[in-house]
Amino acid sequence: MLKIENLHARVEGKDILKGLSLDIGAGEVHAIMGPNGAGKSTLGNVLSGRDGYEVTEGSVTFMGQDLLALEPEERAAAGVFLAFQYPVEIPGVNNTYFLRAAYNAQRKARGEAELDSMEFLKIVREKLKIMKLSPDLLNRAVNEGFSGGEKKRNEIFQMALLEPKLAILDETDSGLDIDALKQVAEGVNAQRDPQRSFLLITHYQRLLDYIEPDYVHVLADGRIVESGDKELAKKLEAHGYAWVADHGEPAG
Ligand code: ADP
Ligand code: MG
Ligand code: MG
């Protein structure tokens, strides 16, 4: 599904990713953990094609395509979705309108007919049940005045609508209380599918109590320095990230 080889990336003239390699198979859930500033968000931003992130070396193949050659909209249309660490507020733009625009942009890029507001509403109602998102959030401006938990659930709701092949969730757990965390995890678990892969970026092990990953990787200083199963996340929780630096063998 996704193959990242020796990826080097630079932000504002600074090298952040320094030879990151990672393989994600269809239907797999991979967690990337790591200390603050390790480059976790940079990885998500590079994969989604965000402006300002310059790839200097390496390759990313997504479902047989050179992902890095695609524009951000083309990546979205191909099925790559990124839920932001800090979801943006868009004052004055109705959330349902925004979601439909994103939904239709993806359909258009795939050569499919766009949906009118009635057709779209039908799909929204179905997905609302899965996400337990309050319908009144749809009628407000995008994320404006949303609580931290509501913003994160809104991101997961957007993901449910777009039905990506690869979903990258950047610290979707941060700042959530336990109930909001469980709701977000339920939303993600409901979308687990043999054809859909997840890259969960997280600083804490807690999220992984609710979304069970197939693999856990540690990102430090721009590379994957250790990989394992969910037990690795527990070790990190117990020993801290310094333990990896002392104990882990850099993996390339
Ligand atoms: P993480 O998500 O693991 O905490 P980031 O990928 O956000 O780490 O950041 C890695 C490094 O890149 C940090 O030193 C951060 O300051 C820098 N960085 C990331 N994005 C930008 C940006 N847009 N402008 C300047 N520096 C950035
Ligand atoms: Mg950070
Ligand atoms: Mg980050």
Image (cartoon, rainbow, N blue to C red):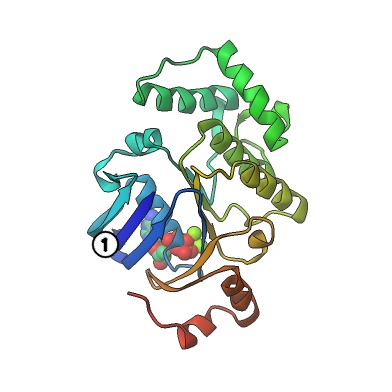
Figure label count: 1
Q: Is mark 1 within 8 Å of ligand 1?
A: no
Q: Position of residue 101 (x, y in %)?
A: 47, 23
Foreground residue, 86 or 101?
101
Closer to us: 206 or 14: 206
Q: Residue 72's x, y, as percent? A: 34, 39
Q: Quadrant of the C terminus?
A: bottom left
Residue at (53, 52) in percent of width and height: 85
Residue closer to the observer: 193 or 33:
193
Depth check: give the residue in front, 192 or 11.
Answer: 192
Q: Which residue is mark 1?
A: 13
Residue 135 figure quarter: top right
Is residue 86 depicted above or below 205 in this figure?
above
Residue sitting at x 27%, y 47%: 68
Q: Is residue 41 left or right of residue 124?
A: left
The amino acid type, in three-letter code, at marker 1 is Gly
Residue 62 visible in the displayed image: yes
Left or right of 223, for residue 125? right
Residue at the image position 72 percent from the left and 27 percent from the top: 136
- Horizontal and vertical percent position of residue 236: 59, 76
Depicted 115 relative to depicted 69: above or below:
above
